[in-house]
Amino acid sequence: MNAMEDLVIVRTSKTPEVRFLASEKTMSLAGRSIPENSIQFFEPLLNWTESFCKSCAGQVEIHVKLEYFNTSSSKCLMDLLKKLEQCSCSAEVFWYYEEE
């Protein structure tokens, strides 16, 4: 069986850095998420997560370090977390935010 590829996307002014590392069982999003089409941006993330869940065992860490995200991104983030909820592995979410 082939090892699963990592998913790495470079941050832009409108999209977050994505580092989904299968070998380390970590997923991180950092930056701003205000893409013109959230569904199109998040589709590869959701597909990767679905594939990852098929072979996942143990625990995965999710790190969310978003400075800002729009409404459509929040819907896609929820879809991503719901997909992880259906995984056979357990997930621990670390949500980083600025204190007011």
Image (spheres, rainbow, N blue to C red):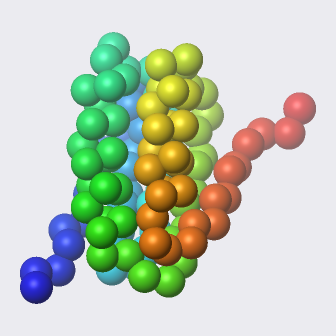
**Does residue 31 show up?**
no
Residue 56 placed where, x, y %? 38, 76
Residue pictured at 86% horizontal, 39% vertical:
99
Height in image: 75 above or below 87?
above
Query: In the picture provided, is 11 more to the left or to the right than 77?
Result: left
Residue 86 placed where, x, y %? 48, 58
Height in image: 38 above or below 80?
above
Quarter residue 91 falls in: bottom right
Query: In the picture provided, is 90 more to the left or to the right than 9?
Result: right
Along the line of sight, the residue nearer the viewer: 72 or 65: 72
Along the line of sight, the residue nearer the viewer: 66 or 76: 76
Q: Quadrant of the C terminus?
A: top right
Q: Quadrant of the N terminus?
A: bottom left
Along the line of sight, the residue nearer the viewer: 68 or 53: 53
Residue furthest to the left: 2
Residue pictured at 78% horizontal, 39% vertical:
98
Residue 32 placed where, x, y %? 50, 31
Residue furthest to the right: 100
**Does residue 39 show up?**
yes
Quarter residue 52 falls in: bottom left
Residue 14 placed where, x, y %? 40, 24
Residue pictured at 54% horizontal, 37% vertical:
78
How many labels sit on residues?
0
Query: In the picture provided, is 44 more to the left or to the right than 78?
Result: left
Residue pictured at 17% horizontal, 80% vertical:
3
Height in image: 60 above or below 3?
above
